[in-house]
Amino acid sequence: MMLSHILRNLTDDRLAEEALIGLGDLVLLTAIEAEAALFEETRGDYVVGAVRRFARLANDEDWLAVMGKLERGERPAEAFLTFVLHWALKRDSEERNPPQGLQPACSCGEDHHHGQAPR
């Protein structure tokens, strides 16, 4: 799987789903299924959103980490997608369970808190 191929085809829900299944990580697949269900999204929708949020919101450390994975891995496309999905799941979990007194706004551009159940 080529990284450019994945990125180009992520807007197609079926192809995003295939890329996710192609990672062969049942734990990751299950976590994404649960997170996507919170918003009545498909797993493919979640994958697309995760990549878009990473591109828009990742800091320098995140980019450095993913670049390191790309350089060291034999399968850079899968390494990229796996890293981004773990990043998104962690971020969504932190948004759902913010430190006391903080209520971060959603970063996906919708008018809900991604990572928090709809009201």
Image (spheres, rainbow, N blue to C red):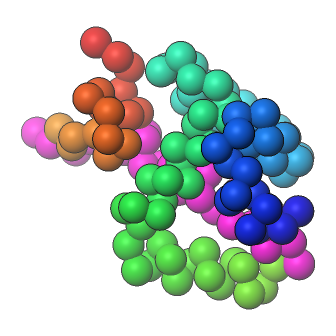
Front one among 62 and 111: 111
Q: Quadrant of the C terminus?
A: top left
**Which quadrant would residue 35 be assigned to in this image?**
top right
Whether residue 85 is in magenta: the answer is yes
Image location of residue 5, percent across then percent down: 79, 62
Chief secondary structure of the magenta portion: helix
Residue 9 is at least partly visible in this image: yes
Instruction: Spot the residue most to the left.
Output: 101
**What is the number of callouts on the image?**
0
Left or right: 98 as drawn, with respect to 6: left
Rendered residue at 50%/77% (across/down): 63
**Which quadrant would residue 33 be assigned to in this image?**
top right
Q: What range is drawn magenta here?
A: 74-102
Is residue 4 depicted above or below 10 in this figure? Answer: below
Left or right: 118 as drawn, with respect to 74: left
Rendered residue at 29%/27% (across/down): 112
